Amino acid sequence: MLKRLTIYCLLHLLALPAFCQYYLRGEIKDEHKKPLSSVKIFVHSARTLYTSGSSGDFGINSTNLYDSLTLSLEGYETKEIKVKTDVWQTIVMKLAQETVAKNRPKLISITRDLEQTGKPSFTVSNETYFQLVENDFIKTTGYPNTGFSLNVNKASYSNVRRFLNMESPVPPDAVRVEEMVNYFNLNYHEPAGKNVFRFSSQLASCPWDPESELLFLNVSAKKLDLARVPPSNFVFLIDVSGSMDMPNRLPLLKAAFQLFVKNLRNIDTVSIVMYGGTVGIWLPPTSGAEKAKISKAIEELTASGDTPGESAIMAAYQLARSSFIKGGNNRVILATDGDFNVGETSEKALDDLITKQKQSGVYLTCLGVGMGNLKDSKLQTLAKRGNGNYAYLDDIKEAEKVLVKELTQTLYAVANDVFLNVRFNPATIKEYRLIGFDNKKEAVSDPNSDIEGGEIGSGNSTLAIFQLIPVLKPGHLLMHDTASIGKVSLRYKVPDDSTSYVLLESLKSNYQPIDSVDRELKFAAAVTMFGLKIKLSPYAANIDWPLIKATALTSADEFNYMQEEFLMQIYKAQKLYVSSKKKKKKKDDVPGK
């Protein structure tokens, strides 16, 4: 009897741990003490996978007092630790080295092994712009290879128009020539079959320099049929802080979103996160069929309070993830003057924040509004890092262009990480200069900077323009040599596919006088000269207003209201800049000065 009792007690003691319950609790943070959500937590004893919550917290039942965990999150180093399950755990995860590299300042264009230096610039009022360094002429013999990121940002043109309409000089760093040219979606040609892109090139005489040539590189993206594209999950992230309480800010955005809502399909979903003083879900995920409900929610927005941009962005992404449509178009649309004054406010901090968020597969579109405190640099940072684009709305016409007429171009991506590389032939091209696609000063001066591709939307035509100095006189290459002047490689990825695709093309010498090329390319040359002129570019010394006007007048489409409006902007700018120059000259001529 005693023996049986002893055996029973031993068995009971051995079995006791199996019935013990411990509650392993804790939090996971990054090195800056920011909570990390969606971290995968593998519990070794149970061989079970858990994930951390939105605040980085977790709670796991365990039958063991001691256990081992493996933690993993994209962009971070995998971490394996031993834990005591009845003790609160505070776990810190480090960024992976490749992520650290990605977070370094990014270049828009790059010529390998070429030493570059930054140049100072200035800002205006309380608005902020990145200090840009213009691309210089490069000798092909030493540096034949150059590359640049393609995107569909078009904010610069409408922002420049805003300054000119106010009869105010434009801050030079607000002028991004490639965005001004691509505002007009010039020389579009539909790609053949199922191709994502169609590439073409044209060599022409340079209107402002008879010793140079212009090379037009044209990348046209395929068009999506809106009736057939997958359902969309849109999250409107709307700034309703006190700074938005002006007619050209929140009221303009409300009118813009009302136009957008009219084109929603029943299969689309819309949510609204508003931030101003506090952050809140103003409208939970709602079907596009309920247009009246969505419109009412937009109309009832009012402006007040501070601008907690950081927490608002995190809330919008969290909501986008919660209503994520697999295989669909998932996108946050941020609408603001960019004046973040609560939480992380620097470009670097916002850069890091968005880099982490875009891993969720959610795109970001930024809509800027307002004047006097527009944070153009912050919105550029957010759009670039969020795999998205940036537009500036100066009036309701621009809102209609961006959100209605060019809806698929703005909000439906056909390619990501788009990067164009050009290798010029030193036997035919002596020097070259990429016009626009200028780099931020801090990216140029950072030796660790690398280049990052951009996003291209449905039906976009992207033009890049080089000014070339040929070995022979302009136009002579065609008579003496039909060989290639260079080669182009277009690298890109398609949404939901990590595969990199490459399109290879040869650049042939198809030289024509500028008056003989497609009129839209000639119009692009006019916009280029205009941009260089108001940018006060040192490369605009031979560009005068009569030349800009003559080139634009002989190429603009009289039935295209945007091109006709551009002609008016030329006259406004000439009046403003010539007048300013005369005033400065009179001031300089005053005796004793």
Image: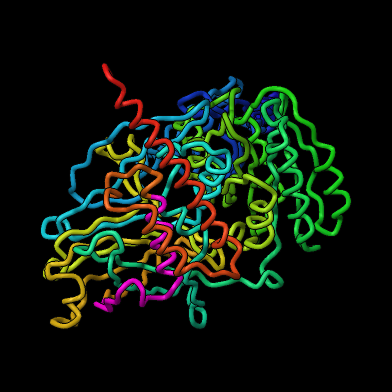
Q: Residue at x 47, y 41 (%)?
A: 576
Side of 136 relative to 2 (left or right): left
Give the image's coloring scheme. rainbow
In which quadrant of the rendered image does the N terminus lie? top right
The answer to if 518 sits in the magenta stretch is yes
Report the predominant secondary structure element of the magenta stretch.
helix
Q: Nearer the viewer, residue 209 or 238?
A: 209
- Nearer the observer, 320 or 302: 302
Magenta segment includes 169: no
Asked if residue 387 lies left or right of residue 543, the reply is right
Give the magenta range.
508-531
- For the question of whether residue 59 can be seen, the reply is yes
* For residue 79, above or below residue 361: above
The image position of residue 266, as x and y in percent, is: 81, 63
Name the residue at 31% across, 41% down: 133
Q: Position of residue 122 (x, y in %)?
A: 39, 30
Q: Name the residue furthest top.
A: 592
Image quadrant of residue 433? bottom left
Q: Which part of the image, by quadrant, shows the C terminus?
A: top left
